[in-house]
Amino acid sequence: MTAARPDGPGETRTCTRPEAELTELTALYEAKGLSAATARTVATELISHGALAAHLDAELHIDPADIPSPVQAAAASALAFTVGAVLPLLAILLPPATARVASPLPPS
């Protein structure tokens, strides 16, 4: 069984315990009320379509399509940082000079 790694696009890793993972996924579906045979069939079919997606959905209730890309996260952080830096700068530069607090140091 192979699953996409979260730390690199296109990279894959091989599960070293595929039977244990299948058993774990089967147990999760049994806990949801499926019979043992049906749970095993569901787990086997879901793993064949994508082990990572099957485990994310069953164990963590995460849809892999809802996970933002690192590029989106970086862009959102950069935008937030820029807006956070511009607001105080505008608060200093926009008021007229007479409304600003005078500097305690004499001009040089």
Image (cartoon, rainbow, N blue to C red):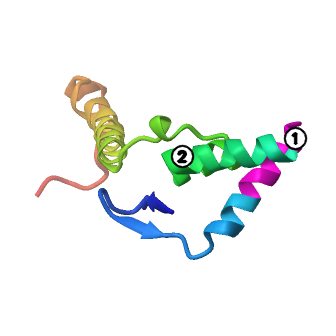
* Relative horizontal placement of residue 3, taking residue 80 as reference (left or right): right
Instruction: Answer with the quarter of the image where residue 11 lies.
Output: bottom left
Indicate which disc, 2 or 1, sits on the residue closer to the N terminus.
1
Q: In the visual, does 21 lie left or right of 46?
A: right
Q: Is residue 29 left or right of residue 72?
A: right
Q: Label 1 near label 2: C-beta < 8 Å?
A: no
Magenta stretch: give its range. 24-35
Residue visible at 32% across and 48% down?
A: 74
Label placed on residue 53 = 2
At horizontal 75% and vertical 61% (from top left) the residue drawn is 23
Q: Position of residue 66 (x, y in %)?
A: 48, 35
Residue 67 is situated, as x and y percent measured from the top left of the image, at 47, 41
**Horizontal and vertical percent position of residue 56:** 60, 48
Say what amino acid the circle numbered 1 marks: Ser
Please give left or right for residue 72 compared with residue 97 in the image. Answer: right
Q: Main secondary structure of the magenta part?
A: helix
